């Protein structure tokens, strides 16, 4: 719902008006959209407020109230960003919780004489804490694509809430509503395939892919080839919008190099003979659903789907980026740290850099060199120390609450995965070099250990490590 | 979810276990269903409580928690009515709101120094008022037919809540959850037709019809004939369960006799030439959704559908029962009331009854005679007074809040309909005679007046009356 | 397309006019239906002939020709049986093969100088043998339910062709067209289930069931229970009309008693534990497809479907009637035949009948007694001889071409089944007693032997016999 | 089924083997595919012949015969082009019509004594003219994508038939089979849209577009924009393969410039306000269906669909190429022809060319100049004469049977369209300049005149001309 996106969304909305409550009411409620000016000046705002009140008071009955809410939603869609902030502020300032009513309810609650009265007072207090804007928000669902409208509305409300407390409570309520509607058991797991998905949906994959950018239709087609799978969660009322999607490669043995996986000229593997499924990209597609998480469910449902389709699969693993590695490295690893290099590695690095002239020994300065990964000698020299550092970063560096410092690591470890293998130069793209000096990591999902791993990690921050990673940590 | 229904629902549930979270976990969570005894003795209850706690603590992670909730749901299905009450009591007594936490939050709220703190404390107070059982209830959605499970669960919880306050707050929370999930804009309006609906769905119409009982498949087929329509609202996760449905006859002129409408041997009307749609039966199908109302929406959506399919339709009216008429009549109308009869009516009644012997003049005693409606003279004598009384009952008798005393009247009047016409001997079935002395009524939906009617009725109890009804009230 | 059926089919046709070629043309072609009199008197017939010619000459182009054909089809539907015969005769007499053109083509063919000329002349001769009515028939496909129209047309043409040679060639051509359109690989195998099939389709099962009549909806529901399956073949353009359907019971061990299978009060078997699938009824549903056979394909596809759904199934067998047994018995088995009875059986029969008085020994006269099967002594006496006679009838009695005399036996034996077991009093219904003295038979489909059995039977009439049946034949 | 396409088709076929007859038979029939060598040497050919015979003799029964046919089809798919020709020759030489049987049948036919015998002999003669390969061809339908297989087979058979008479009769039979299966009333008209069509289907549009090449996904998306429509005919058994498709632009007034229509940067028109639908591209997608025409039907069905969706549309017109114009011009128009130019045009041309140096006056030599259309003076000079010549070419130049010389003109004129308008420089692409000196033409579909136009054109070659075109012809 940026200016650009909202324009086309609006177009669709206004064009594709499915039959709904809109048609039931006379035409009167549809007029505001046309007459309200984009920046919502004072007069228009006043009129809008009247409309909002009418809607909340259920004027004309339930059906009319829905129609009115849809009309308000269309007004919103026609506003520019200034007008939209004013619209939301109108709601936030006029239809929040009534503090005096809360005080009154608290008084009744405290005065309650017996458990029965107490129960009644509790319910009344809960009621007093419900802001009227909840009803307004809920009824925007009457728009033809009402659920998407609300998801996008939240994407616009969130940055406002970060900078202005007035919007916080409303954002929190909207998140509650969406969390209820997007209960994971309402979602549909769907395979997204070249043979069945519409071009309109596939375009969205290109737009939403957040890990390894999709470079046009050929790249996309390659990711949906016979030895690939893509799955997403969808909401029944947003059938053309993935909420989250994962891309999987069917291979033999655990992959360590994402360039190989994404190579459009590589031959296909026979998926029926593959023994390993590599989850190499997971992207959240809806900013407005921030804080409502599906990733854990998605991975496990997809493991299940793949197991059913390909009985030969034995191993389920990710090939993941390490987004925070370089930042941590630059910020916290002193070049003088005693055990960064073995003596031999130090010699090799000096030799390699000496030939290039200068920069002897400083890890950070070597990493700052452009295209260092194309220099075989430097690579040889850095492989050991960087891999060990990455293992240490992933396995041992924590932030508050015993959470892994790396956000991707935290996600998979809290899902119960094992830290399986570091992959030297697994991602040589610009982004991969900048974020993680080209390193990638595999998190392994072993269904038999997932629960125990989750418990150990959540309760004490303990990380399940493969023997390979353990070795890296010892040296 | 009576004993009988739950058995077959259970059967379906256990047999049709679609792929879901169940399959992801190992088999361990499924065992309780088998081992828990139907009446839930102490030991089993204890074990269940542990499971519930594990589920609430998210032990093993999000996915495991859902699996555990589904297992708990299956335990419930296997219990008898004694066991089920114990199960619900376990939840009600162990996972309600923590009063001390509420007190603490109230304290914080009152101590809040500025509006920012106040806002935070408000959110915290709302949180403290959320009972943990909410999460348990929500997660039962992980069952293959989880939504239906919860609807049926509420149908069993409601009578308990009426007799025992311990269940009241839980019932209120469950109603909240369902109200959010059954937001009317999530529902699908579907035509239910002989050519497309499954036999399993049609069977449910027979079972759920609440106004004019459906007497087998021939009767049903007649109600789905070419000059009839049946529509229902459905939830996407309960595709084979109507929530509410309405039966409509396409006719010429407003119908006044339901026996004529239901006559299976009557010839069909050409629906394209019909000018009137008669809504002759509306039935709520899910007891567990009591208090969440769809009827108003259904009628108006159906008006819209019919208008699109049959442009010739000019009039939309119900043919409705008057369920409370006789009860009111017997209780409140004194036979000696001066203006019940005209002199001529009084004479006619005496003559009619004199021929039958005795019972002179007493309205109540005549109505108590078996099959009086087969006596033409009595009918002739009673038509005037009873029709006037019914008009008075519907238009003028109120209960608290200016609501019409008759529940069906209240429903249609608050929807904005007009009280159009009384129909003498419109329903001569046993039920029709017992409830309303055979009288029926038409409520007319005139789209142009609906909003104004709704406002007048809701704000002041004013009823829109046709000139015919007005005349009845004058005499 | 009897009077009665055609009326309702016509209704549907005229009402449900889907958008099609009809709408493209102006309204002119639709007029005839209204103006043509039902018995097609001379004048109307003449006009019709002009229309047919226009259609064949493609007047107005391809699209107009289709529209015209549809209009002709509607005329046909509006005729009574007299009119319909005249309509078909018009076609048969005016649009058959032109004999002189055939003679001409034969001449050219014989004069052909070389293989190239010969090939051309062959094609020309084939062309000359194509009657113009083929094009008319084909284009009736332009009717909204054109395929069903042609199937029903053939059902009406067949009896005419039997009594009047003028219709024979046209019937043969129509059969050719239908055989091409109903190629078995165009058909869809669909399960017909209580939960998914429409009431309109299920009604047709009741109407079309040809082996064991379905006695209302309860009986039908029982046949679609969890331990039953029903499958049919459907054509994509006749989605609501089964072509043929089979009813299957999932049981343990081979069933021998159809009353037990059809008992609505019997408890369900757990289908997942069943080891045997019993095909107890196969019905062709479309008379107009006579001579185009699907049964063989249906059985084997269903075996495959069931094997996939129920891996425990080991045995696939029919429980079949023996429709020609009594007729054969009465006509050809002399009571004096020496080996009909063992001495003991003869004694037992005399004793049993003696007690009843008279009729000593004559098999035929005993079988003529009403309700003899309720007399245990008679049953005991007849079991041996009748079972042996039935085995002999099924295994050894032939008609021309080494075909089994019994039509059901011929069907299954030519499909490669084995004659497995005779079942004494397997069908005690009136029909079962009249056709086969209550005997039923199992034909076993053993996939490993089907091809060899088929070959042996088709080439030499050899029947695969179980050891049990062999024993019966020896005595 | 070129080498390249067939490879991927084969892949799909072998991978996606849906459940079918294949699974029923044991594995034995599947073996040949693996063991037959791609170029089908003598030994393999011999074995194949045996298989073909077994299939024709129905060895093992109907079902086995289908399985065998599918196995033969898979063998074919695995062959290279040499092997495939041998495969087809095996069929052509071994399973054609038996000449002696034909002679015999002719004899019987001539000897027939009465009309009854004659009828029987006629049927027998028709039978004798049916080559056995028909059955083989038909049964290839047992392949999972059997219909597509046969369509592609014919695409490979057609060039063989052109060079070798041995294949001609088989090609003619295959065309017959396909013509029956692809009866236009079996086809589904489907809209092909960006929001609903799969990427796999859309890729085929790019591949099959035959008029104005689609330059990648952006170009395609533009052709499926909100003011565009694309429709195709599909066969139910080839759901992902369009048979023919048409691209339509919704505009105001008749378009004369295809570059404007295809401009991806042009703004969209509001389709609801458009008054004209321009059919600017019609492509046949299946070479194997050559000679079975759908275009006439497609255009009229699409006119109907569009009329229903957009009631504002008043005019339906093509914007068509004139593929044969330059060829005719170069071959038959003498530069010295007296009336090619008016005196003024001649002067203008000389002036324009004089400035360029040389080439005075010769039309052909000017047209041979590269990029002449970028020279405004030349364009101005040529516009008159070329437009008049094109009108003459389209309206008056005929080939045998009074057919328009230009194939596109013949198609639309025989459909009943009117020759409406010539468009100067309507297609300035390389192809447009080479084929038609940049000229394009509109054919107008006026539903009220279509039939009369068709009749006039088919019977006498008369062309319906707009007044504008008539003026061009007069000068």
Image: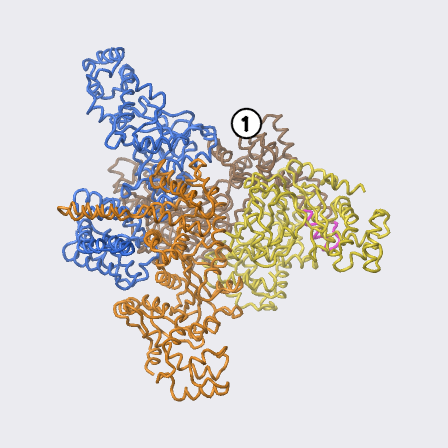
Chain colours: A brown, B yellow, C orange, D blue
Toward the left, the furthest residue is C113
Q: Which residue is drawn at 56% across and 28% down?
A: A34
The x, y position of residue A416, in whole percent, is 44, 54
Q: Which residue is drawn at 49% across and 36% down?
A: A16
Front-most of B394 and C472?
C472
Give the left or right position of residue A334, taking residue B207 as reference: left
Dot 1 falls on a residue whose secondary structure is loop
Front-most of C145 and B148?
C145
Quadrant of res C420: bottom left
Residue where numbered disc 1 is placed: A38
Give the left or right position of residue D425, taking residue A204 as reference: left
Quadrant of res D403: top left
Q: Does B173 sit above or below residue A352?
A: below
The x, y position of residue B298, in whole percent, is 60, 45
Magenta part of the chain:
A111-125
- Is residue D409 something one can see in this rendering? yes
Quadrant of res C65: top left
Is C221 in the magenta? Answer: no
Answer few, some or many: residues within 10 Å of disc 1's Cα (few below 14, many 20 plus, some between 14 and 19).
some
- Is residue A333 something one can see in this rendering? no
The x, y position of residue B327, in whole percent, is 76, 54
Q: Mark 1 lies on which chain?
A: A
Is A123 in the magenta? Answer: yes
Front-most of D61 and C206?
C206
Q: Is the magenta stretch mostly helix, strand or loop?
A: helix
The x, y position of residue C2, in whole percent, is 46, 55
Q: Does C317 sit above or below residue B444?
A: below
């Amino acid at each position: 719902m940026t200016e650009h996106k909202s324009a086309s969304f609006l177009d669709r909305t206004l064009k594709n008006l499915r039959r709904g409550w809109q048609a039931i009411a006379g035409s009167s409620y549809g007029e505001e959209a046309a007459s309200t000016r984009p920046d919502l000046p004072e007069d228009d705002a006043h009129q809008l407020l009247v409309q909002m009140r009418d809607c909340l008071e259920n004027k004309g009955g339930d059906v009319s109230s829905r129609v009115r809410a849809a009309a308000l939603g269309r007004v919103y869609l026609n506003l520019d960003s200034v007008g939209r902030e004013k619209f939301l502020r109108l709601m936030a300032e006029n239809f929040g919780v009534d503090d005096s009513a809360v005080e009154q309810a608290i008084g009744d609650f405290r005065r309650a004489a017996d458990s029965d009265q107490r129960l009644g007072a509790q319910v009344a207090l809960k009621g007093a804490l419900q802001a009227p804007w909840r009803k307004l928000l809920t009824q925007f669902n009457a728009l033809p694509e009402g659920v998407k409208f609300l998801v996008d509305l939240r994407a616009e409300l969130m940055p406002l809430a970060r900078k202005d407390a007035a919007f916080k409570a409303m954002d929190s309520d909207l998140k509650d509503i969406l969390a209820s509607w997007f209960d994971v058991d309402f979602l549909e797991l769907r395979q997204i395939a070249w043979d069945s998905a519409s071009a309109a949906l596939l375009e969205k994959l290109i737009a939403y892919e957040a890990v390894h950018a999709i470079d046009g239709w050929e790249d996309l087609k390659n990711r949906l080839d016979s030895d690939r799978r893509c799955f997403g969660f969808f909401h029944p009322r947003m059938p053309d919008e993935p909420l989250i999607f994962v891309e999987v490669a069917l291979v033999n043995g655990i992959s360590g190099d994402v360039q190989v996986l994404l190579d459009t000229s590589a031959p296909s593997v026979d998926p029926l003979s593959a023994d390993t499924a590599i989850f190499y990209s997971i992207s959240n597609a809806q900013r407005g659903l921030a804080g409502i998480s599906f990733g854990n469910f998605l991975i496990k449902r997809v493991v299940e789907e793949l197991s059913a389709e390909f009985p030969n699969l034995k191993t389920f693993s990710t090939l993941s980026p390490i987004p925070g590695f370089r930042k941590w490295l630059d910020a916290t690893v002193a070049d003088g740290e005693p055990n960064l290099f073995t003596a031999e590695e130090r010699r090799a690095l000096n030799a390699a850099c000496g030939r290039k002239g200068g920069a002897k020994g400083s890890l950070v300065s070597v990493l700052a060199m452009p295209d260092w990964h194309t220099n075989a000698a430097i690579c040889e020299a850095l492989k050991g120390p960087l891999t060990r550092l990455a293992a240490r970063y992933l396995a041992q560096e924590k932030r508050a609450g015993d959470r892994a410092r790396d956000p991707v690591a935290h996600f998979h470890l809290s899902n119960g995965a094992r830290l399986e293998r570091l992959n030297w130069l697994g991602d040589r793209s610009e982004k991969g070099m900048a974020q993680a000096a080209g390193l990638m990591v595999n998190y392994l999902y072993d269904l038999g250990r997932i629960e125990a791993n989750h418990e150990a990690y959540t309760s004490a921050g303990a990380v399940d490590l493969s023997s390979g990673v353990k070795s890296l940590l010892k040296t």
